[in-house]
């Protein structure tokens, strides 16, 4: 690790990562980390000695009493450079980075455990780069040390080892090749079930199965956890008697993890080896399509839970699985790599509560049945170069007072609509004449 010769390691880390600096023009640049973030990361280093310093302290004179361990800067760098699917040029990149950092903090105890193994067993790793922490990412470090055991795993609930279903959970699917356990109880029984199916964080690395932590409650309060495994798999773990290979799905957070807590390609799984579960999980997907059953907001067809649903079930199924309580439909194709055109079905008329529709760069036509949406007030069909016409019976909508066609320059507006509208210019029409 690089350190400045005239400072202790903790001073160096505070100055470099948790202290604002000024650029050449004298403008103040925000610190990369808050002091609390930095201390949380440093504490994950098994070589760090806190020396009775309060972890919540922020006063410099108090913090410099900490003796930062040899792996502290490695942890900081991994946190500041999280692994993401999107690039800085992609829409939504900043949000993905923020979420990746949140997950890193959630899993910090795992990093700490892997570093303990590395520190203790690195003499058994290959000479050279294999014994230098800077050569590892969080994932490759885990791969390097996962077979080392710091303690002998035991459990006080071994009598439940052969239980069909653990209390606090229920068997919701038992097929030819896969079994699905649902944990929807967000209380103590659910926590106990999550710990069991995750092997108390020994057989898996799921944070929800770690005894003594609150991660289970955080996830369970959003929606059920699903544990999936092959009941025919004879390669079982000694603690629980469950197959060593198992998966955990949590749809509200778009997390689909293997036993090593690594994100899986759900599309490949459900279109491949887990194809028998594809229809079973469709209703759970549908729950996550809208916010509170009232809003559907899409800004990308290739990312997030919406993108996965479309890839697995198609655009037609997207609309057929939306609740009739929908009040806002907002679809904006901001993905410059995607040229998807949505077929708005005639069945849009079943969403009688819709008051707002925004379709941005994603349609080539709009069905006449839109005139049945009597509560519709705002209609924006913007940036749709392939849209050439709109139904004239839009003029009959009793509560519609704003129509926006900005950027849809090829649309010929029917005279029936123009007779009712006041032209605001730039494709915007006020229908309250």
Image (cartoon, rainbow, N blue to C red):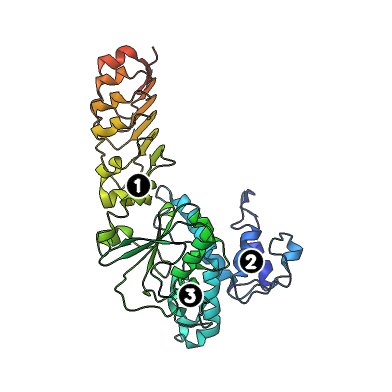
Q: Is residue 386 visible?
A: no
For marks 1 and 2, the one nearer the N-term is: 2
In the rendered image of this protein, does residue 220 appear above or below residue 370?
below
Q: Is 111 displayed left or right of 372 in the figure?
A: right
- Quarter of the figure with residue 170: bottom left
Image disc number at residue 286: 1
Rendered image quadrant of residue 234: bottom left
Q: Residues within 10 Å of mark 3 (few under 14, many from 20)?
A: some
The disc, 3 or 2, on the residue closer to the chain's N-terminal end is: 2
Report the Cα–Cα distance between label 1 and label 2.
Answer: 46 Å
Do the numbered discs 3 and 2 sit on residues whose CB atoms are within 8 Å? no
Picture quadrant of residue 281: bottom left
> Where in the figure is residue 415, as x and y percent of width and height?
26, 14
Query: What residue is rendered at 49% in x and 68% in y?
Result: 195
Regarding mark 1 in the picture, which secondary structure is present there?
helix
Q: Where residue 13 is drawn, which disc sits there?
A: 2
Horizontal arrangement in the rendering, residue 402 relative to residue 40 (left or right)? left
Of callouts 3 and 1, the N-terminal one = 3
Residue at 38% of width from left, 35% of height from top?
325
How far separated are the C-alphas under marks 3 and 1?
Answer: 33 Å
- Relative image position of residue 30 (x, y in whole percent): 61, 52
* Front-most of residues 379 and 261: 261
Residue occupied by mark 3? 202
Q: Is residue 40 visible?
A: yes
Q: SS at mark 2?
A: helix
For label 1, count other residues whose C-alpha is less than 10 Å away and answer few (under 14), some (14-19) or many (20+): many
- The single residue placed furthest to the right in the displayed view is 61
Residue 16 rendering spot, x and y as whole percentages:
62, 63
Q: Which mark is residue 106?
A: none
CA–CA distance between discs 3 and 2?
A: 32 Å
């Amino acid at each position: 690790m690089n350190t400045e010769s005239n400072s202790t390691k903790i001073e160096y880390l505070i100055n470099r990562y948790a202290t604002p600096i000024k650029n050449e023009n004298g403008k103040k640049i925000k610190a990369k980390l808050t002091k609390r973030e930095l201390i949380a990361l440093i504490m994950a280093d098994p070589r760090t000695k806190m020396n009775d310093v309060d972890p919540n302290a922020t006063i410099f004179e108090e913090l410099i009493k900490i003796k930062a361990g040899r792996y502290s800067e490695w942890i900081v760098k991994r946190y500041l450079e999280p692994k993401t699917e999107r690039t800085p040029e992609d829409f939504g990149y900043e949000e993905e980075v923020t979420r990746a950092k949140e997950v890193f903090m959630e899993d910090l105890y795992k990093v700490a455990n892997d570093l303990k193994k590395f520190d203790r067993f690195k003499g058994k790793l290959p000479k050279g780069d294999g014994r230098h922490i800077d050569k590892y990412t969080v994932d490759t470090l885990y791969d390097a040390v996962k077979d080392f055991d710091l303690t002998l795993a035991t459990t006080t609930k071994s009598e439940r080892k052969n239980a069909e279903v653990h209390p606090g959970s229920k068997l919701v699917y038992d097929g030819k090749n896969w079994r699905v356990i649902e944990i929807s109880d967000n209380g103590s029984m659910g926590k106990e079930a999550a710990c069991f199916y995750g092997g108390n964080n020994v057989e898996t690395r799921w944070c929800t199965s770690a005894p003594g932590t609150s991660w289970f409650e955080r996830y369970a309060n959003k929606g059920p956890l699903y544990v999936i495994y092959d009941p025919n798999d004879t390669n079982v773990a000694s603690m629980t008697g469950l197959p060593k290979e198992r998966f955990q799905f949590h749809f509200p957070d778009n997390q689909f993890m293997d036993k090593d807590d690594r994100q899986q390609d759900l599309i490949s799984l459900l279109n491949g080896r887990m194809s028998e579960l594809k229809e079973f999980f469709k209703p759970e997907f549908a729950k996550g399509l809208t916010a509170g059953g009232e809003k559907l907001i899409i800004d990308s067809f290739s990312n997030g839970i919406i993108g996965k649903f479309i890839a697995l079930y198609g655009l037609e199924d997207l609309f057929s699985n939306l609740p009739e309580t929908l009040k806002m439909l907002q679809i904006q194709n901001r993905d410059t790599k995607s040229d998807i055109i949505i077929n708005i079905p005639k069945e849009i008329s079943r969403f009688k509560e819709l008051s707002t529709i925004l379709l941005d760069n994603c349609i080539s036509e709009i069905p006449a049945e839109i005139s049945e949406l009597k509560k519709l007030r705002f209609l924006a069909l913007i940036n749709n170069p392939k849209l050439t016409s709109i139904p004239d019976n839009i003029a009959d909508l009793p509560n519609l007072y704003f129509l926006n066609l900005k950027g849809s320059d090829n649309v010929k507006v029917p005279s029936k609509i123009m007779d009712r509208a006041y032209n605001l210019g730039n494709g915007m029409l006020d229908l309250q004449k």
